[in-house]
Image (cartoon, rainbow, N blue to C red):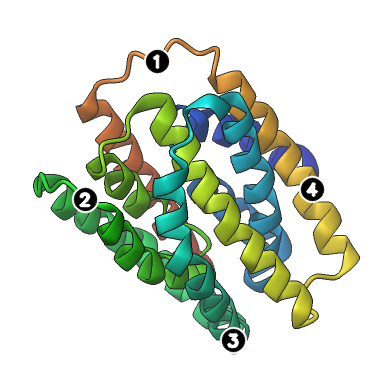
C-alpha cells in the first residue's frame, strides 16, 4: 500500500511539475518521510528527481537554453556537493525540522522575489546557482526559488521547463554521486528511488499534452499552497 501511495502521488506530482516547473518534491517529501524516514527520503527523492527532470528535458528537448544552464550549473553543482555533505552530518530530527521550516520560509521569499521585476543575466545565474545548489543539497528542492530566477532571465513555457530541468538534473546527479561516495545509497534506496522516479517521469510526459490555461495568480497560489502544506506536514512529523 505504501508503494501504491508513492506511485499515485508521484504521478500527480510529475504532472504538476511538468506544468508549473516545480512541486514534485513538495508533494512527495512528506509521503517519503513518513514511509522511509527523513535521511532515507532525501536520497530517494534525489534519484526520483533525476528521472522526473529527465522526462521534462526529453519532452521539451529543442527548447533548452544551454548557455543559461551552463552558467547556473557552474556554481550550483559544487554547491550541491557541499550541501549533501552538510546534510549527512545532521541528525534525522534536525533534517525534518529544517525541511519544514524551509518550505514555510519559501512562501514569503517567493513573493518577495516575484515583486522585483529584475532581468537576470548569465552572471546573475552563476552567482545565484551556488547558493541554490547548497540549499538543494540540504533541503531536497528549491524549485520555488529557481522558478522566478529562470523566469527573470527571460525563459517561459517550454524553454523555462526544459532549462530549469536541465540545471536541476545536474544538481541532483551531483547529490546522488555524493550520497554514493559516502555510502548513503544502498541498493534498497536506489530501488525505491527508481520506483518513485518512474511515476514522476510518466507524469512529466503526460503534462506536455495537458492544455495549460493557468493564470499567473493561480500559479502563485498553487506554489504557495504546496509549500505551506508540505512545510506543516514535515514540522508535524518532526514534532512527533
Q: 212 or 81: which is nearer to us? A: 81
Disc number for residue 212: 1
The mark found on residue 58 in the picture is none
- Mark 3 or mark 4, which has the lower sequence index? 3
Q: Residue at x 28, y 63 (%)?
A: 105
Q: Is residue 23 visible?
A: no
First in sequence: mark 1 vs mark 3: 3
Task: Tell me if 18 is positioned left or right of 184 in this view.
Answer: left
Q: Is tag 2's residue or tag 3's residue first in the polypeptide sequence?
A: 3
In this image, 147 relative to 108: left or right?
A: right
The CA span between labels 1 and 4 is: 28 Å
Q: Nearer the viewer, residue 152 or 37?
A: 152
Q: Residue at x 45, y 73 (%)?
A: 134
Residue at the spot of label 4: 194
Tag shown at residue 91: 3
Position of the N terminus by quadrant: top right
Give the spatial CA distance, label 2 vs label 1.
26 Å
Q: Would you place residue 48 above or below residue 158 in this image?
A: below
Amino acid at each position: 500500500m505504501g508503494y501504491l501511495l508513492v506511485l499515485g502521488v508521484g504521478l500527480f506530482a510529475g504532472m504538476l511539475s511538468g506544468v508549473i516547473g516545480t512541486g514534485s518534491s513538495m508533494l512527495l517529501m512528506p509521503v517519503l518521510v513518513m514511509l522511509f524516514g527523513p535521511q532515507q527520503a532525501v536520497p530517494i527523492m534525489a534519484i526520483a528527481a533525476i528521472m522526473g527532470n529527465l522526462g521534462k528535458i526529453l519532452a521539451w528537448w529543442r527548447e533548452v537554453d544551454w548557455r543559461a544552464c551552463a552558467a547556473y550549473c557552474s556554481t550550483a553543482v559544487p554547491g550541491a556537493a557541499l550541501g549533501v555533505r552538510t546534510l549527512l552530518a545532521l541528525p534525522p530530527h534536525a533534517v525534518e525540522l529544517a525541511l519544514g521550516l524551509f518550505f514555510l520560509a519559501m512562501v514569503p521569499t517567493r513573493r518577495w522575489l516575484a515583486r522585483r521585476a529584475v532581468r537576470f543575466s548569465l552572471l546573475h545565474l552563476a552567482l545565484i546557482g551556488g547558493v541554490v545548489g547548497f540549499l538543494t543539497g540540504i533541503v531536497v528542492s528549491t524549485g520555488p526559488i529557481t522558478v522566478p530566477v529562470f523566469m527573470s532571465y527571460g525563459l517561459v513555457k517550454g524553454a523555462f521547463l526544459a532549462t530549469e530541468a536541465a540545471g536541476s538534473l545536474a544538481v541532483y546527479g551531483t547529490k546522488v554521486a555524493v550520497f554514493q561516495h559516502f555510502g548513503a545509497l544502498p541498493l534498497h534506496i536506489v530501488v525505491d528511488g527508481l520506483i518513485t522516479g518512474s511515476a514522476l517521469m510518466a507524469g512529466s510526459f503526460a503534462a506536455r499534452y495537458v492544455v495549460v490555461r493557468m493564470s499567473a495568480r493561480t500559479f502563485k497560489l498553487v506554489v504557495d499552497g504546496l509549500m505551506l502544506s508540505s512545510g506543516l506536514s514535515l514540522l508535524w512529523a518532526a514534532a512527533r
